[in-house]
Amino acid sequence: NARGNLYKTMGDYSKAEPLFQEACTVMKEKLGEGHPAHAAAINNLANLYKAMGDGEKAEPLYQQACELLKGGLGEEHAHTLTSVNNLAILYDETIHDYNKAEPLYLEVINSLRKASNAPHPNFPGHLRNLANMYVLAGKLSQAEPLYIEARDLLKSTVGESHADYGTCLNSLAWLEHSKGDDTIKAEGLYLEAQ
């Protein structure tokens, strides 16, 4: 897996693919099909195919990883939610099937809302992922409260100087720009994000 990730990061997918495939086989043989490490290896192979732009190969692998993790660790475990989020991102960004992405994003967000009184560190990012999808799908009124919640959480947890806070402000500015009715507000958000 580590060498596969190295080659993937370098963009050398032809060297990464057999290593990820071998990791899937070894993990299944050594630890069993339901083991989280096997699901992680499958998820890594799916990530490679997603990076290659091959949603047809990535989709069934992400689905398999989700099912294995739900069965082995439970539906609300952090590893399971990461896998579900990966599938949502595939549907959103690669396949552009927002109807499949939305319930998966909501599953992750709702599970994290239930899990704890303190927000999970990735929670604002999950809110922003769903909001970004809503903007792309033309559902601007559904995106705005998610961006605002993410911004407010980031402001209270990591502060205004954190890069994620700036990214969230950029997302809010993009929303305002997409609405087309308040370019001054969009410009102010872009400037504040810098």
Image (tube, helix red, strand yellow):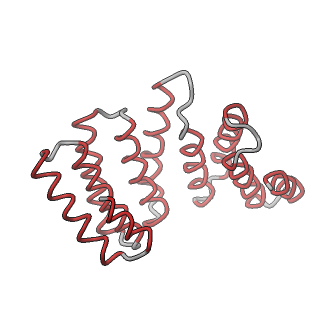
Pick the residue in front: 3 or 75: 3
Q: Quadrant of residue 181?
A: bottom right
- In the image: residue 159, left or right of residue 48: right
- In the image: residue 79, left or right of residue 160: left
Q: Count all numbered tags in the image, as a single digit.
A: 0
Q: Residue at x 39, y 69 (%)?
A: 8
Q: Residue at x 73, y 58 (%)?
A: 174
- In the image: residue 23, left or right of residue 128: left
Q: Position of residue 110 (x, y in %)?
A: 48, 33
Q: Position of residue 171 (x, y in %)?
A: 69, 54
182 lies above or below 146? below
145 lies above or below 116? below
Q: Quadrant of residue 135?
A: bottom right
Q: Position of residue 48 (x, y in %)?
A: 36, 66
Q: Which quarter of the figure is the N terminus placed in?
A: bottom left
Q: What is the residue that sits farthest to the right in this orientation?
A: 184
55 lies above or below 62? below
Q: What is the residue that sits farthest to the top in this orientation?
A: 117
Q: Position of residue 118 (x, y in %)?
A: 56, 24
Q: Which quarter of the figure is the C terminus placed in?
A: bottom right
Q: Quadrant of residue 148?
A: top right
Pick the residue in front: 5 or 182: 5
Q: Residue at x 84, y 51 (%)?
A: 192
Q: Residue at x 85, y 56 (%)?
A: 191
